[in-house]
């Protein structure tokens, strides 16, 4: 089964301007090149939390690390042909209804809500509590961390297991999947930016490093993206599986939150503009938003 779902093609319009910078620029080196240095990378957290994914037949089929896919489909149409963007309201914002299961502790629930709110600070995405809408994000604690890519229709699961998934970077990572984005290292131009060392990958996990013909929204490859896996993702021998090029010493997969380029892509994909950021405009036909 091939799931072709990544950042979608959009027409560009007025987009909020962001300075593209971060703790590690594309040419900046760092000294951490051991498995232990990647302990809190997104991919390491996902690997640990997803050890039991696939054992419960009542849960969605999960492939490519943390992407839920519909069962019974082969050669599925690309996400763009399914219309999997969340719809934009007339006030310029994109309201994504959500529901959080009662199984989370109050502290975990607070962390999840903070992750939901982080999108409103810099994009036109507004996660809003479910209020009888048909399509919504259903945040549950299942066997690991995973999400469908893009809007699937009706209640779509975003799993954030209480054992290992309730971290800001994992929450943002899975929500970006739900908004229509795939992993950074699967980009169509990844071979100009990283080398994939399949000889070091755990047998059967090679699909995590597949390449997709993505629409990259006019943005550069981002080593600092919260969607980028770490250097030792799915390694069978404690050797790197992803090495940046031409500078092998660049830090990758170490994000603890969305990068400025992650934010820029959301705004370009959903055609966010200045209207969506005006504090004097109240949301239309919504009782509450985050």
Image (cartoon, rainbow, N blue to C red):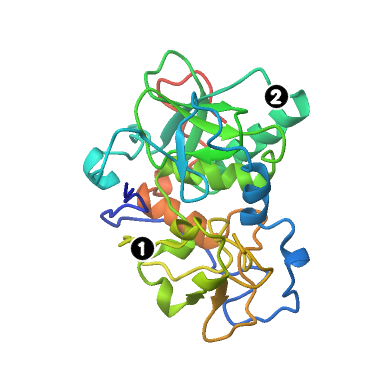
Give the x, y percent position of residue 261.
50, 62
Disc 1, SS? loop
Would you call the spot at circle 2 few (<14 residues within 10 Å), some (14-19), or many (20 or more)?
A: some
Classify the position of the C terminus by image quarter.
top right
Give the x, y percent position of residue 54.
53, 36
Distance in Å between CA atoms under marks 1 and 2? 35 Å
Q: Is residue 288 above or below residue 266?
A: above
Instruction: Please identify the quarter of the rendering in which residue 155 is found.
Output: top left
Disc 2, SS? loop
Q: Is residue 31 above or below residue 213?
A: below
**Which tag is nearer the camera, tag 1 or tag 2?**
2
Q: Which mark is residue 216?
A: 1
- Whether residue 14 can be seen here: yes
* Residue that extends furthest to the front in the rendered view of this protein: 203
Out of 97 and 29, give the one closest to the viewer.
Answer: 29
Please report whichever mark, 1 or 2, sits nearer to the chain's N-terminal start: 2
Residue tagged 2: 104
Give the x, y percent position of residue 274.
42, 49
């Amino acid at each position: 089964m091939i799931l072709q779902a990544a950042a979608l093609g959009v027409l560009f319009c007025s987009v909020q301007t962001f300075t593209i910078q971060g703790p590690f620029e594309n040419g900046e080196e760092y000294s951490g090149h051991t498995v232990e240095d990647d302990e809190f990378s997104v991919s390491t957290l996902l690997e640990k939390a997803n050890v039991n994914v696939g054992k419960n037949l009542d849960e969605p089929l999960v492939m490519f690390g943390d992407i839920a896919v519909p069962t019974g489909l082969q050669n599925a149409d690309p996400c763009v042909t399914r219309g999997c963007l969340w719809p934009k309201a007339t006030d310029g914002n994109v309201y994504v209804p959500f529901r959080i299961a009662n199984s989370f502790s109050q502290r975990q629930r607070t962390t999840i809500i903070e992750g939901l709110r982080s999108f409103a600070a810099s994009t036109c995405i507004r996660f809003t509590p479910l209020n009888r809408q048909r399509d919504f994000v259903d945040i549950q604690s299942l066997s690991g961390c995973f999400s469908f890519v893009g809007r699937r229709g009706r209640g779509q699961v975003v799993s954030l297991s209480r054992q290992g998934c309730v971290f800001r970077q994992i929450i943002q990572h899975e929500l970006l999947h739900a908004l229509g984005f795939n992993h950074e290292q699967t980009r169509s131009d990844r071979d100009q930016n990283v080398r994939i060392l399949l000889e070091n990958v755990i047998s059967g996990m090679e699909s995590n490093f597949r390449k997709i013909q993505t629409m990259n929204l006019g943005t550069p490859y981002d080593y600092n993206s919260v969607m980028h896996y770490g250097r030792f993702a799915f390694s069978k021998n404690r050797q790197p599986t992803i090495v940046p090029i031409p500078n092998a010493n660049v830090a990758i997969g170490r994000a603890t939150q969305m990068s400025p380029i992650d934010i820029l892509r959301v705004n370009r994909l959903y055609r966010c503009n200045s209207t969506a950021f005006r504090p004097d405009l109240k949301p239309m036909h919504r009782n509450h938003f985050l």
